[in-house]
Amino acid sequence: MHNTITVNLFRLLLAVIFFAMSAGAQADLQDATEAYEKGNYPAALKEFRRLAVSGDATAQYNLGMMYHKGQGVAQDFKEAAVWYRYAVKQGDADALNSLGILYQYGEGMSRDYDEAASLYHRAAGQGHAGAQFNLGQMYHNGKGVPQNYKEAAWWYRKAAAQGSAMAQYNLGVLYANGQGLPQDFKEAASWYLKAAEQKNSKAQHSLGLMYESGQGVPQDWLQAHMWYNLAAGDGYETAERSRRSIEYKLAAAQIEQAQALARKWLAEHSK
């Protein structure tokens, strides 16, 4: 009886110690994250490194990310990969996706599309929107996996549902081209609009093209000019050319109206 009580007390003590250590680590991680978000990279780097060495997967990923981006430290893709791999061993989805990016672009290692696709697949299976989009692109382009538009659309849709603007745009492209999906210009326009509302310049331009031609939406040259204008304002040169081209079809007063529409849109989406 005495031994049972002693064992139970010991287990309780271990649980209390573990909880206290875990709570302390979470507080330290939060402090490091706050320092990072405030742009205090030296402080964030120091704290992430301390936590990463102790085995915290989130800190390992964040430390890798700082090396990846060169924040608070010289950019070093190889060192980024080292820390991503530590976090990957613990199944961290962010690290899986980021390590996949290094493999895809051959940064700090030999380019390996197969390995990139494998890593994206593992992260995508955990619901990581970025990895779902990246995996969709691999299927779209046939890199690391056989080209499969249906599979690309499936993963784009997963990422699009989580708000990925690029996935929404690419899903629109597949609908517009009838690749892996029945050709549906209305559906394409709907996805372009979702991405355009997030200020994706390619989607804004594509939506402008649809308004200019009347595919999937009622033909409206003022709307077309507005979307071209918005995309061009973001530095998208193709949209600039489209805007100049459609201006030959519009009177000066109509161009002013379209510009007013663009200003109104920007004011409504400035937050």
Image: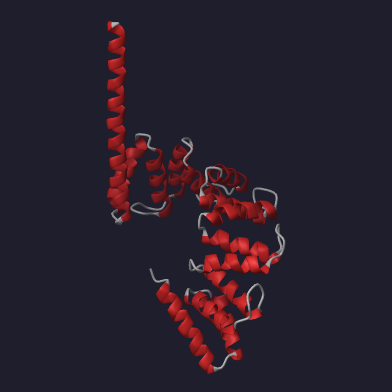
Residue located 41% across and 39% down the image = 57
Say left or right for 212 vs 55.
right
In the rendering, at what x and y percent does residue 69 appear?
41, 54
Quarter of the image for the N terminus: give it: top left
Q: Nearer the viewer, residue 235 or 263?
A: 263
Q: Nearer the viewer, residue 161 or 52?
A: 161
Seen as rendered, the residue at the extreme top is 1
Q: Quadrant of residue 187?
A: bottom right
Seen as rendered, the residue at the extreme bottom is 252
Q: Is residue 197 above or below residue 83?
A: below
Say left or right for 230 vs 111.
left
Residue located 47% across and 77% down the image = 233
Residue located 33% across and 38% down the image = 51
Say left or right for 257 vs 173.
left
Number of numbered markers: 0
Q: Nearer the viewer, residue 264 or 64?
A: 264
Quarter of the image for the C terminus: give it: bottom left
Any part of residue 59 in sight = yes
Any part of residue 46 in sight = no
